[in-house]
Image (cartoon, helix red, strand yellow):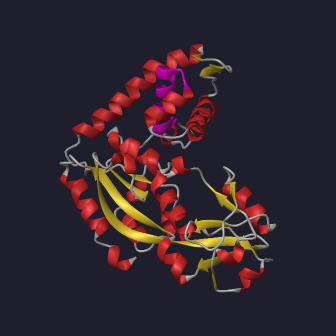
Amino acid sequence: MATAAHLISSNLPSVKQLQCFLAVAHELNFRRAAERLCMTQPPLTRQIKCLERVLGEQLFSRSTHEVSLTEAGRALVARAESILAELYGLKSDSLATVERLRIGLTRTLNFEFVEPLNQQLARLNAEDDVETPNLTSAQLLQCLAKNTLDLVLTGEKGASHEDAVHYRWVCREPLFMALSAMHPASLKEKVSLEEVSDLPLFWFARSANPSFYDKCEDYFSRLNVTLKKVKEPDDSLVMLTHIARGKGFALMPQSKCTFNQEGLSYRALTDDASQRLNIDIYAAIRKNEKNKAVLDMQEMLSGIAAGC
């Protein structure tokens, strides 16, 4: 059976673009729409701009105070709802559809380089199900509570979600030190924090991950030196550029130490530090979860601990 070429064109609106459009159309507020979709504002804005580019129409009028639908946007609302309703019906009516799980991965880690966890995710084709790869652990746990995700892989436990979330430990990700190749400590295979105490530590706010923050601060308090700290830039590449110029150092998950730049080096921590400074990865689901597929996946992920 021949298929019309225009129906398989790559230049068509995507389902995600239509979902983002409807969320903004209903909320008329990008921040609230992003929260509703359990994503951050920048990728939401990109989806809307891509949709406008594909359709060749401006869908929203935006000012510093309000967001409103254009005439083209108002016309699209009913059509987008109809298209998504048809797709939803296609999904629910198909008896042959294999249940797919909604998985969220913390942006703190690069799971492509966390073995053997990456192998398990690839084997499950989980990359097709990861709906929120760029959220923090705290944001992922909020999505879990709102039932927009089935299982999330977090860095450390969320202290405020103990009553509603069931955690299973998966594996431990070591921290490495990013420092300037000009610093004498970079000549060593393993570096202690005391050896770089002449540099400020690029550090994050406790609200981003209280459990991990407190674990690290507890270790810092036991050092013989007091670490100077500066706020880490929002852009990690900017931070690494500063580090390469000798303006500070940072503690980073090993899986994130992939950016190469002249003057930048990554070193393992000394044995004492590495035992205390690390990220425990947990597979988290709702405590009242009854879906066997979700329970089985958490069990399977927690079973790979021996390989990490």
Q: Over which residues does the magenta segment extend?
A: 13-29
Q: Nearer the viewer, residue 222 or 98?
A: 222
Residue lying furthest top: 71
Q: In this rendering, does residue 256 appear at all?
A: no
Q: Is residue 168 above or below residue 285?
A: below
Quadrant for residue 146, please give it: top left
- Residue at image point 35% right, 44% down: 144
Position in image of residue 140 (x %, y %):
42, 47
Quadrant for residue 94, please give it: top left
Q: In this rendering, does residue 273 appear at all?
A: yes
Position in image of residue 57 (x %, y %):
63, 24
Q: How many marks?
A: 0
Q: Nearer the viewer, residue 293 or 283?
A: 283
- Residue at image point 48% right, 72% down: 276
Position in image of residue 126 (x %, y %):
38, 58
Left or right: 252, with 196 as reference point:
left
Left or right: 104, with 238 as reference point:
left
In which quadrant of the rendered image does the C terminus lie? bottom left
In which quadrant of the rendered image does the N terminus lie? top left
Residue 283 among those drawn in magenta: no
Position in image of residue 271 (x %, y %):
53, 83
Q: Is residue 27 above or below residue 202?
A: above
Magenta: predominant secondary structure element? Answer: helix
Q: Nearer the viewer, residue 68 or 78?
A: 68
Residue 22 among those drawn in magenta: yes
Quadrant for residue 30, please give it: top right
Q: Is residue 33 above or below residue 133?
A: above
